[in-house]
Image: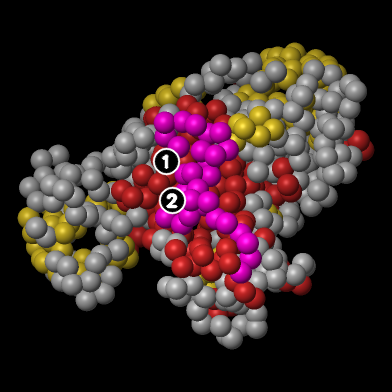
Amino acid sequence: MVPVQGWVTLRSLGVTFMEKIEILAGRLLPSRTLTLLALGLAAAGFTTAVFADPGDNYPVPVYTAAAPPPTPALTNLPLMTQISQEGITWTFSQPQRVGRFVNGDYYVVGPATIVDIEPPATNGMNGSMLNIQVNIQQSGFDSRILSGRYNPALGVYPPITLNPGNELVSSRSAPSNLSCVMRPDDVSDSPVASVSILTSVPAPLPPDAFRPSYAQGATNIYFSRNLQRQLLPTLPPVRDVPPLSEFEGYLQRPWIDSVFFNFDVPAEYMVSYGREGGYLMSFASLLLTLNFTPAQKEPLLVYMVQYGIDLYGLVQEGHSGWPAWGGYGHGRKLPIVLAGLMLNQPQMTSVQSQFGEDMQTIWVTQTPPAGTYTQSWQSVPQTVVYGGHVGINGNSVNPGWGPYEHLPPTQWVNTIGEEYRRCCTSVCWIGEALFARLIPGMQAAWNHPQFFAYADRWMFVPDAAADLAAIQTATGLVIDSDFYQGQSWKVLSGGGYHTGYVAFADEMWAAYRNAPQITAPSRLAGGGLTFMVTNVSPNTAYNIQACTDLSSPNWSTIGTVVPVANTFTFQDPQPTNPQKFYRVQQAP
């Protein structure tokens, strides 16, 4: 089956009439046929999809710019003396007007005073913080937080005045530490179970408003009516697909990500290690590329965009990011870039910060001193390599913590880089890289081609037996097959994630990474179209086909190309008014 690359609206290319081009890509299948998939567009009005959550069954409708929801009058909001969410209850000093953001989090039209929070903050547990500070790397949630990261001075206690712009972040502690999300064989370091956020606003908001980031000083409010849902493909499912409800459940509640090393994460639903963060973002994002209806996708899309908004707010307010540190630092860039693309926010899409995925993937020529090395040591030399335990300058932090693949194993200072390259980083990047390739414009917006080249290397270049033997002989490191290149799921399974869909990202990679893709469309002076086709095999014939009616498509071959490289440019000189749809498939 074929990935739908998305709708391209030619108005952005200077065309005044309404015109859309369906860009599809095909690859050789046993039947040598290509099946058309209609890309679901959000219908006008509000199509309600309800997510599966036993605690708070809050609906997440599809709101559109064509029919935006009205902002309620103040008197139309419920007057509440107490609100509860996910086991946390806030009590006001007097009745207050209360509303909800599109993801279900509450707001109160302030100012308001909280006179009680349940469960109460006693014995160093169930703490609340007001307006989370960035870059202090401390938390006031629970005195059992490790490594000196607990700071009781950050806690706030009733009575608490919430002026507009304030966000009260309240936690519910776990009696004992919980199993890790997507890694149930291990126990989380965090004693925090769940977190809920109450935001004070100056006036009612429309029901499609996203909650502003919990970062201190962040006030930007975005609206789900502006989500560019047409960018999401509607691919046919692979064999083993996770349920949407599982990943909605992980992402519905706030992910608190201001303290590095995940010491204070809400462990009931948030990952406790960066590797699982990469895995979870891979699975959740790839679900958004499948042929669920827009209403079915909406809850998960909203929750992922909200996470991206929260992270971007931290960056905007000065957070230093989530840098490379072994298996930490992963899974944060994807939701920020996704949120930027979905909300059409270029500054968010081009976010500048520290991200583990980027810091740990480099061209071998970047290895210090830059320009000295041109290929890696392996039997099949590589030009993209692992950047090291903490990135390109890691050897200045600790010997052996920087790049090392430019040297043969006999010259390695230690094996920490190779161990973490295999156990805790590469394997969780595969789904992220594939998702970014499938979303129009996302790979370019990511702006780190080394990451995508490295993901391809991991999946397409198998370990040579001679290389594995050389590592063992030189260092004593025996690499188990669970950590071989060419797959990403075995480490996840080894952590106890024994589901029938543990190989979901691998199956999606096999189905869609090699599919030809149509990109960079532009209008010709005479009204035709030119576009580029990528991901093709040299010296192989491809048919370019077109039709003008998707409801009863009658595809005709308008050209056949035998490329000499893995990309080619095609021109259709025929005018495309009012509409024309294209697809590519390998010739029989």
Q: How is the image coloured?
A: secondary structure
Stretch in magenta = 474-502
Disc 1 element: loop
Q: Amino acid at mark 2?
A: Gln
- Label drawn at residue 54: none
* Picture coordinates of residue 581, whole percent (x, y): 19, 53
Is residue 414 visible to us here? Answer: yes
Which residue is rendered at x = 43% and y = 65% of the image? 464
- x%, y% of residue 504? 41, 40
**Mark 1 = which residue?**
503
Q: Is residue 273 above or below residue 484?
A: above
- Which residue appears at 39% of the width and 26% of the height? 47
Residue 427 falls left or right of residue 258: left
| Label 2 neighbour load within 10 Å: few <14, some 14-19, many 20+ | many
327 part of magenta stretch: no
Residue found at the very far bottom of the displayed protein: 372
Q: Point out the tag, 2 or 1, that comes first from the N-terminus.
A: 2
- Residue 487's disc is 2
- Which residue is rendered at x = 63% and y = 24% of the image? 99
Quadrant of the frame with the N terminus: top left
Front position in the image: 399 or 285: 399
